[in-house]
Image: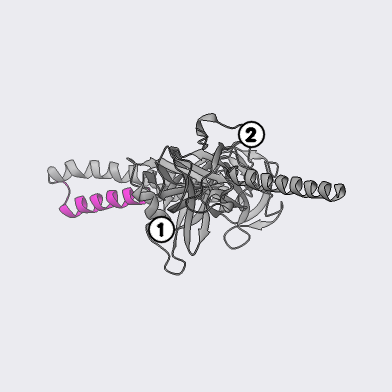
Amino acid sequence: MIAGVVVGIAVLVAAAVVLFKVFSRGDRPAALPVVEVQPVETSEVNIYNEYVGRIRAQQFVEIRARVEGYLEKMFFEEGTRVKKGQTLFVIDRKVYQARAEKARAQLIKARAQLNKAERDLARIRPLYEQNAASQLDLDNAQAAYESAKAEESVAQADLTQAELTLSYCTVNSPISGYISERSADLGTLVGPSGKSLLATVVKSDTVLVDFSMTSLDYLAGKDRNVNLGPGESERQGSYVTVTLADGSAYPYRGNVDFASPQVDPSTGTFSVRAEMPNPERTLLPGEFTRVKVLIDVRTDAIEIPAKAIEIEKGGAYVYVVRPDSVVERRYVETGPEVGNNIIVERGLAAGEYLVVEGYHKLHHGTKVRPVAAGPEETDSSEKSEEQ
């Protein structure tokens, strides 16, 4: 009897404990999901596009022999820097020196004949005025003088041409730059009918970067405040940056100084050129590079992390925390990407709080406990139920 009473009491105590736990759990409010938020802010954002570009020298000059002859001397070290006007090669001068001397002698002879004709005319003219010489004598003297004068002009031109040809035997550098290896060895017959290319000189202190852009990019730049073509000096000039062969960023930036006035119908693109400083000769002509071009400047732009955007059925959505700590699933219109961020064209306003972490467990109307994104929580951003 006593044992039965004890068992009954134990059963009642166990039932009471179970009921207490059930009712106590029902009274306790469910924990709110914690999400990280950040305030929506506006800023000025530069937007860049990337293209494949090719480096070329600002000036690339071929040094060629303009006269025929044997290459006698070379006055430079291959691969070094040469100055404008510096003597590079000397071609055999003997033949052209002789031609110049002959032309000079012909000029002396022509001047002597001109002087004689001038003196004859000076003697005939007063005799004709005194009726001591006929009209024919005067005409012959006048014609002889004019012919001698013409001969003197021809001889002067021949001498000028001969001296100019002689000067071509000395080959000078037309620009300052770095010279290539010689293309012809000493003793080689060079000239227009032989091997004319002697070397090349490259001016690469400043290089040009060629790349192609689409017409849509060009229109985007024109609609903003970026100048992608010539003839628009009142606009802000666009600048470019390039990468080196190892993928690192080149420390200098260049300016767009030319854009083709027409689009290539086969590719739908047009050629653009930028001028880039190259003081250390880091950029080598002929190499390919990635070109980043300032294509747009957005003022008061809203830029949010790409990870905060949810893509569903062709639309982009974000979660915004309202002042009552309830999230709102909102459609936004996105713009260009800037690194790991995306510009929002429509759908967000400055001062709102955007969910950047934890939105996968949310749906429209969920009540949350927001905390500031980052290692530290911001009390001002928390809108818990207890407050």
Res 62 visible: no
Q: Residue furthest bottom?
A: 266
Image quadrant assignment for residue 297: top left
Three-letter amino acid code at the position of disc 2? Pro
Q: Which residue is mark 2?
A: 375
* Mark 2 vs mark 1: in front: 2
Q: CA distance from mark 2 to mark 1?
A: 42 Å
Q: Is residue 120 left or right of residue 133?
A: right
Q: Nearer the viewer, residue 309 or 172?
A: 309
| SS assignment at label 1 | helix
| Residue 175, x across and y down, in percent | 54, 42
- Contact between marks 2 and 1 (CB within 8 A): the answer is no
Three-letter amino acid code at the position of disc 1? Leu
Q: Is residue 88 left or right of residue 215?
A: right
Q: Main secondary structure of the magenta part?
A: helix
| Residue 8, x across and y down, in percent | 79, 50
| SS assignment at label 2 | loop
> Which stretch appears magenta?
132-152
Q: Nearer the viewer, residue 21 or 110?
A: 21
Q: Nearer the viewer, residue 284 or 299?
A: 299
Q: Which residue is mark 1?
A: 216
| Residue 237, x across and y down, in percent | 41, 41
Q: Residues within 10 Å of mark 1 (few under 14, many from 20)?
A: few
Query: Quick check: is 146 in the magenta stretch?
Result: yes
Query: Quick check: is 45 in the magenta stretch?
Result: no
Res 70 visible: yes
